[in-house]
Image (cartoon, rainbow, N blue to C red):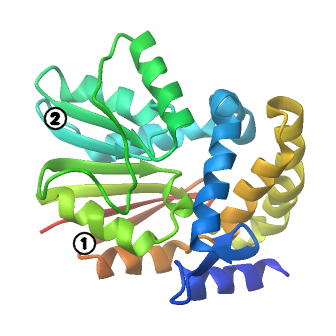
Amino acid sequence: MGRGDEADDASAAGDASSDGRTHFGFETVSEELKAGRVAEVFHSVARKYDVMNDVMSGGLHRVWKAFTIGRAAIRPGMRVLDIAGGTGDLAKAMAKRAGPNGEVWLTDINESMLTVGRDRLLDAGLMLPTALADAEHLPFPDAHFDRVTVAFGLRNMTRKDRALVEMHRVLKPGGKLLVLEFSKVWKPLAPLYDAYSLRVLPWLGKRIAGDADSYRYLAESIRMHPDQALLAGMLTSAGFARVQVFNLSAGVVALHEGVRL
């Protein structure tokens, strides 16, 4: 399967299908099986997640996250929900901006990732509320948050459309969603990018995290994720207005924004 075919599949699938089948990397599996296998991936990589992020991106993930924080424009006293927040990079930065009167939640569906994130926040002197939460069924009231963020987590969700509707539900009118995710790279760079992510990343995963298969899945999941235009359309379908897309590092990553009116 070539890169163009993979992108077409992602555009066609975008999400779970009506027959209960979905993608786990390049495999087609049941929705239930995907949830379990994604959980296994993140249980495996949790302790080495931050180290691998620095190695894989050459530290660029910090620049991408800083751009997202800037676009979030957190003000003192705001209520913020970080979904699939993992090791807590965004939650930590946003909590400092929201201040002592703010409310910043760190959530993740994976207990291992959430534990690492909670511990990192405590090490930084931050006692933030945390919750083990499924993005498709958020345990929060309607119109509660000023901002909702999800960084590098949406592509692992089985029913992305349902998750986006839930994010819309918990935002206040005027609140903003920010989705930072790997996307479709600038076409001239695609061969080099494919060689690096599909061949080098699993090797790095084996050498550093002792797990090549999990990083092979993560590389494949990028190809099966909706591209910039399709994801923008999904935000609009979920009810968001003023949708904007910011390509970062030649489209390796894109930040999608949407506002609940």
Sequence-first disc among 2 and 1: 2
Answer yes or no: is residue 117 visible: yes
Q: Which mark is residue 75?
A: 2
Image coordinates of residue 238 in percent, x first then y, are: 29, 76
- Measuring from the top left, give residue 159's x and y in whole percent: 46, 72
Location of residue 112 by image quarter: top right
In the figure, is residue 258 to the left or right of 172? right
- Which mark is drawn over residue 72? none
Could you give the CA–CA distance between mark 2 and mark 1, rounded to whole angstroms? Answer: 21 Å
User: What amino acid does circle 1 point to?
Assistant: Phe
Above or below: residue 49 compared with residue 247: above
Q: Residues within 10 Å of mark 1 (few under 14, many from 20)?
A: many
Type of amino acid under label 2: Arg
Q: Secondary structure at mark 2?
A: loop
Classify mark 1: helix, strand or loop: loop
For the residue carrying disc 2, how many other residues have a C-alpha within 10 Å: few (<14), some (14-19), or many (20+)?
Answer: some
Q: Which mark is residue 240?
A: 1
